[in-house]
């Protein structure tokens, strides 16, 4: 049984799930032991001015159950939709183009209606725009140009590169904009929804919507980290630096090891990379090891010669990363100025 109440009258439900904060998660609502669903009710009330929303009346049901729509139910959109469904919300509509995406909808959201993007907006309270970064601006603008029903709806995208400015056409039409980016890769497997647990989300939202954004992330099992709009590109660049470039580095290292005669380079690299990542996360620059950190210019010169002979296309990347490592080691007091000068001479572009 469901009933409509003014949002400002949403009450705390004793049967709901209580959230437990992790160390360092400084949300007032968590410290007070409030439920994320109740936070969501109050946050929406503050921006909707008492606009009615659906409030469940059963004691074990979500106090602010939202109808969720997904535009672009790919791997990320499906994982986020499933996480919201687990939290008590309902995926009611989706707009999918590929047969694979349509199959995901029928498999994971059997009660959801397949429709177009405007139809998703018309059916949902919360719309996830989980499309590629370069498609998002034209999608938002196109829906606004056709007078799609943005007004009063939470419109959230999961792009790391964009903040909420990309949603300006929707915001002008009355939408409530959110940027909720999970710092995780998804594979399309069944366990994708479980990978969200404990994952940080880069959140950008207007001040009055921050509690709602944080509550949604917590309900999905994530940890919200607020990123100002003006820092969104830097935030995404940092993540790409770490994750995307790591894949390239590991693949290139494996290729060099094969050239050197190693039959199973991945097995050789696994323990080393695991220890290096652990050291980096625990100790930062103090975890640096290797010939650059030691100022061993002779060894670095041998590296430059060997890579230049076998994989010359990889040499600029080795030089650039070695120079950056030397700069950081010098700044951390691990490398003397004289050792750094010899290293940088070896790493110069001249041959």
Image (cartoon, helix red, strand yellow):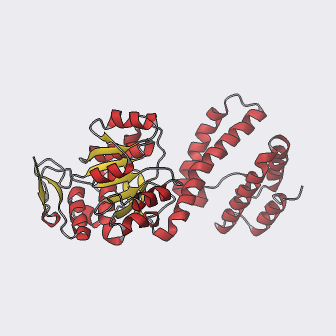
Q: Is residue 100 left or right of residue 32?
A: right
Counting every numbered tag in the picture gives: 0
Q: Is residue 220 left or right of residue 268?
A: left
Residue 284's image quarter? bottom right
Residue closest to the eye, 94 or 46: 94
| Residue sticking out furthest to the top | 263
Q: Which residue lies at the image location 17% right of the left edge and 63% below the top edge?
A: 7
Q: Is residue 286 left or right of residue 214?
A: right
Q: Which residue lies at the image location 84% right of the left edge and 62% below the top edge?
A: 345
User: In x, y percent, where is residue 256?
Assistant: 74, 39
| Residue sticking out furthest to the front | 146
Q: Is residue 105 visible to the viewer in this orientation of the structure?
A: yes
Residue closest to the eye, 285 or 149: 149
User: In x, y percent, where is residue 184?
Assistant: 47, 48
Residue 22's image quarter? bottom left
Residue closest to the eye, 243 or 157: 157
Q: Is residue 214 visible to the viewer in this orientation of the structure?
A: no
Answer above or below: position of 277 versus 175: above
Q: Which residue lies at the image location 46% right of the left edge and 52% below the top edge?
A: 183
Q: Quadrant of the C terminus?
A: bottom right
User: In x, y percent, where is residue 217?
Assistant: 34, 55
Residue closest to the eye, 135 or 325: 135
Q: Is residue 222 left or right of residue 188?
A: left
User: In x, y percent, where is residue 42?
Assistant: 21, 65
Residue 165's image quarter? bottom left
Q: Which residue lies at the image location 88% right of the left edge and 59% below the top edge?
A: 350
């Amino acid at each position: 049984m469901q009933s409509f109440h003014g949002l400002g009258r949403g009450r705390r439900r004793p049967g709901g799930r209580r959230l437990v904060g992790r160390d360092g998660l400084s949300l007032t609502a968590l410290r007070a032991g409030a439920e994320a669903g109740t936070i969501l009710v109050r946050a929406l009330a503050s921006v909707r001015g008492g606009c009615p929303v659906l409030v469940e009346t059963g004691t074990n049901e979500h106090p602010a159950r939202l109808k969720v729509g997904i535009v672009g139910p790919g791997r990320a959109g499906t994982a986020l939709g499933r996480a919201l469904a687990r939290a008590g919300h309902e995926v009611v509509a989706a707009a999918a183009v590929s047969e694979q995406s349509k199959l995901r909808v029928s498999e994971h959201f059997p009660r959801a209606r397949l429709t177009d993007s405007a139809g998703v907006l018309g059916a949902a309270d919360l719309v996830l725009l989980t499309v590629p970064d370069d498609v998002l601006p034209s999608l938002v603008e196109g829906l606004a140009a056709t007078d799609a029903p943005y007004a009063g709806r939470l419109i959230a995208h999961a792009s790391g590169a964009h903040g909420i400015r990309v949603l300006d056409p929707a915001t002008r039409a009355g939408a409530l904009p959110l940027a909720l980016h999970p710092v995780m890769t998804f594979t399309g497997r069944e366990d994708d929804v479980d990978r969200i647990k404990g994952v940080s989300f880069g959140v950008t939202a207007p001040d009055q919507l921050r509690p709602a954004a944080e509550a949604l992330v917590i309900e999905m099992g994530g940890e919200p980290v607020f990123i100002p709009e003006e820092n969104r590109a830097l935030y995404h660049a940092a993540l790409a630096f770490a994750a995307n470039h790591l894949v390239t580095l590991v693949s290139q290292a494996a290729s060099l090891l094969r050239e050197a005669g190693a039959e199973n380079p991945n097995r050789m690299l696994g323990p080393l990379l695991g220890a290096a990542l652990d050291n980096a996360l625990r100790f930062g620059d103090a975890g640096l090891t290797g010939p650059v950190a030691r100022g061993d210019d002779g060894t670095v010169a041998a590296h430059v010669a060997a890579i230049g002979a076998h994989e010359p296309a990889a040499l600029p990347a080795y030089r650039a990363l070695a120079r950056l490592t030397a700069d950081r080691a010098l700044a951390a007091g691990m490398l003397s100025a004289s050792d750094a000068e010899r290293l940088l001479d070896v790493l110069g572009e001249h041959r």
